Amino acid sequence: MERMAFRAQTILADVVLAALAFGLAYLVAISAGSGAGPDMADAASLTVVQLVVLYAALAGGFSMLFRRELSPWRYASIPDALVLARIALLTVGVFLLWVFVIDRAHGLPRSTLFLAPMFQMVGSMGVRILRRALHEHALESFSPLKTVSDRINQSPSLLLIGPPSLADSYLRDIARSHDRSHTPVGIIGLDPRDVGQQVRGVCVIESLENLDEALADLRRWNRYPRSILFLEEPGRLKGLTADQLGRLKTDGIRLLRLPSIVELAQHDGVTLLPMRDINIEELLAREPIELDRVAIGNLIRGRRILVTGAGGSIGTELCRQVAAFHCAHLTLLDFSETSLFEIDREMAETFPRMSRQAVLCDVRNAARVLQAFNGEKPDLVFHAAALKHVSMVEQHPCEGVLTNVIGTWNVAEAAKGCGAGQMVLISTDKAVDPTNVMGATKRLAESVIQAQQNGGQGARFSAVRFGNVLGSGGSVVPIFKSQIERGGPVTVTHPDMERFFMTLPEASQLVLHATATCAEGEGRDARLFLLEMGEPVRIMDLARQMIALSGRTPGKEIEIEITGLRPGEKLTEALLDETERSLPCAHKVLEVVSNSALRVSSAHLAELEVLADRGDVDGVRRALFELVAQIRGERPGAAPTLRVVANG
């Protein structure tokens, strides 16, 4: 009832405004001596009151027709103004036809027909603008009772960096939410042509290429910012250097950003989310990707999802994004008690209404994995559980084989056994022409996935291969961070070493993107996808950049030390093997086309598992690389009976 009463009040207000507009227009026309004279007024069959009532009734009818009662006045915008103009023009047009039919508009001053819709538009839009101004406290700065000191907000000063359009959206949001945690002191635009313009009272003081000059001016004006808010993802802002960002952090300026798309999806209905500090990984990242959110939503929404290695870096981010796309049920499976507890607690706090189950389970235990899968009945499985540290797996090849190879086989068999619709393996570029045990185990794991399916019915299997992930467990970035915090030196194994890098959210989103592509494909063969990683990054350059971002000088305040390559480590990584080629299949996603020279069977893995259980390090290493050599066609193997990946 309250909602109906509010809508009725809105319509009534528009009717009253239309009546006042027509009455004022009539008085102005009469006082100006235009239109009909006294004789024509005497001959008129409609009185002034009747004309006002008729005009107001028509205005109310058109207001209801265009559902103006559904548009809150505090959010009035340009589209609302256009609709109000249409209502005014339709009102006067129908009114003219009506009175012309009744008495050929005798006694009606002609200028009234021009003035009434103008007054109606000005009045109806004016009250809405006033209501919005009150809602956004836009009139406070005009109060004559406030002194200059009262006008100066004591909250920390904030500098905005980004295009004026995004600045306008942000300033409007903080006005609506009455957020006084920061005081915007200026905007650094991306286009020099915008300099000098004002956005909701905040001036575009400089372009990004002149950031240093703008900060110097703000310091002279005693408005030096305490925080800087990036309105776009840092990867989109060209022209910012690591040295500049390092100096800003040294000056004590907080670097902030707005919530990402994924974070917004986790907080439906929140008008303005708190800003958060930018991680170094985000400052090092490339330009963010544009995803097909519809396809990913169709893949995840309403389905039961299981993530192995849910407590790891990739697994954790996959859980966050799967939950953000409103899955029906999420199963968190991990062997690390602490990691599983942390991700389960995060899901409980961030998505309290989501159905979920934490399962403490080792993927090496086939019976336990099958039991967990049969109990959870997942529709879609993401297999992220793996040993990923090259040096550690090189020292412990038996553990690497048991987790990365046997564990993958167990998960794949369990996915088929419980009736899952799709399983996705998270692979790595180290699987290409592997020179270390970790890469060899991941290459064999890819072949395990490919051997699970041969054009038949049942679950779809796929693998997604990508490079290093910034900020993940074992990544070089947290290692460099800790070394910089200790004062150095920063250790680099070789000055010419290069690696491909992605951020955690980007890698996880592309995994979902590739999975959605596989789900929509027509082929039933196992498929291998490759994520576009851009250009490789020199680790030496990365180290220098991170030192600069910390506000130090590379080679002076923080030394860089060359330690030499570790066993099994390569100078450069490749994303494709010599026997493979790639075809574009989706934005930022390629499909790898290859013919395996060996179809991996349970017999191959049984022999390898026996050696690993026995702890035969040399035997495991020898058998592992022999299998990989056969897969790559370097040694004779069984005739291929499986097309590794669909060409279409």
Image (cartoon, rainbow, N blue to C red):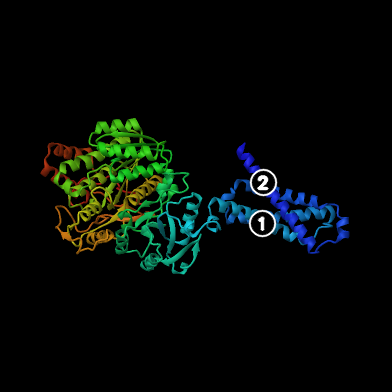
Q: Alpha-carbon distance for marks 2 and 1? A: 15 Å
From the viewer's side, name the closer residue of 57 and 49: 49
Amino acid at pointer 2: Ile
Residue at the spot 89% in from the left edge and 59% down from the top edge: 39
User: On residue 161, which mark appears?
Assistant: none
| Mark 1 nearby-residue class (10 Å; few <14, some 14–19, many ≥20) | many
| Relative to 77, 608 lies left or right | left
Amino acid at pointer 1: Met
Tell me, yes or no, if residue 352 can be seen here: yes
From the viewer's side, name the closer residue of 208 and 104: 208
Residue at the spot 29% in from the left edge and 30% down from the top edge: 371
* Quadrant of the image occupied by residue 535: bottom left
From the viewer's side, name the closer residue of 401 and 124: 124
Tell me, yes or no, if residue 380 can be seen here: no
Question: How many numbered dots are placed on residues in this image?
Answer: 2
Residue 538 percent across, percent down from the top left: 24, 61
Q: Is residue 434 above or below residue 451?
A: below
Q: Secondary structure at mark 1?
A: helix
Q: Which residue is mark 2?
A: 11
Q: Is residue 220 above or below residue 546?
A: below
Q: Which residue is mark 1?
A: 121
| Relative to 44, 27 lies left or right | left
| Relative to 614, 272 lies left or right | right
* Quadrant of the image occupied by residue 312: top left
In primary-sequence order, the first of circles 2 and 1 is 2
Residue 608 percent across, percent down from the top left: 17, 40
Residue 106 percent across, percent down from the top left: 84, 57
Quadrant, the N terminus: top right
Q: Secondary structure at mark 2?
A: helix
